[in-house]
Image (tube, grey):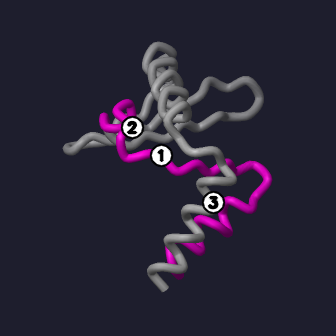
Amino acid sequence: MNSSIACLEFAARPSVFLQVVNPDCLPGLAGPFMIAKLPDGQPDVISSDAPAQAQITADPDIVAAIWDRSEAIRVWAYPERESLRLIEEARRKWT
């Protein structure tokens, strides 16, 4: 399946918010990460990738730092509607 089509289908889910990040976004350059918000008051968990190995932790200081980084990236990101338009535009160009 074309990855842009998969993104658009995934973004149609009610709990998914998809935003394209401007390539000039400096906070995102430290590497990919994921934040898992767990149910029932469990602490959030992050997975942060590094060249040699991923780090998975619920350490509150590290999780807070990743949440801060996530918010900094969202400031740079295009709004969701514009992001979806950019993905659709790329899909048309590449297919």
Closer to us: 17 or 54: 17
Q: Do the residues labelled 2 and 1 touch (CB within 8 Å)?
A: yes
Measured in 3D between alpha carbons, the distance from the residue under mark 2 to the one under mark 1, in whole angstroms, is 7 Å
Q: Mark 2 points at which residue?
A: 25
Q: Residue 84 carries which label?
A: 3
Measured in 3D between alpha carbons, the distance from the residue under mark 3 to the one under mark 1, in whole angstroms, is 12 Å
Q: Do the residues labelled 3 and 1 touch (CB within 8 Å)?
A: no
Closer to us: 57 or 10: 10
Which residue is farthest left?
52
Q: In the rendered view, tell whether residue 30 sits above or below residue 3.
A: above
Q: Position of residue 58 (x, y in %)?
A: 50, 25
State the count of labels.
Answer: 3
What segment carries the magenta color?
A: 1-30
Measured in 3D between alpha carbons, the distance from the residue under mark 3 to the one under mark 2, in whole angstroms, is 18 Å
Q: Does the magenta stretch include residue 19?
A: yes
Q: At numbered mark 3, what does the secondary structure look like: helix, strand or loop? A: helix
Looking at numbered disc 3 in the image, what kind of residue is underneath it?
Leu
Please tell me which residue is depicted at 46% across the width and 13% down the height of the picture: 61
Please tell me which residue is depicted at 73% across the width and 23% down the height of the picture: 41
Closer to us: 6 or 57: 6
Neighbor class of circle 2 (other Cα within 10 Å; few <14, some 14-19, many 20+) is: some
Q: Mark 1 points at which residue?
A: 21
Please tell me which residue is depicted at 57% across the width and 45% down the height of the picture: 78
Looking at numbered disc 2 in the image, what kind of residue is underneath it?
Cys
Please tell me which residue is depicted at 62% across the width and 24% down the height of the picture: 43
Q: Which quadrant of the structure image shows residue 24?
A: top left
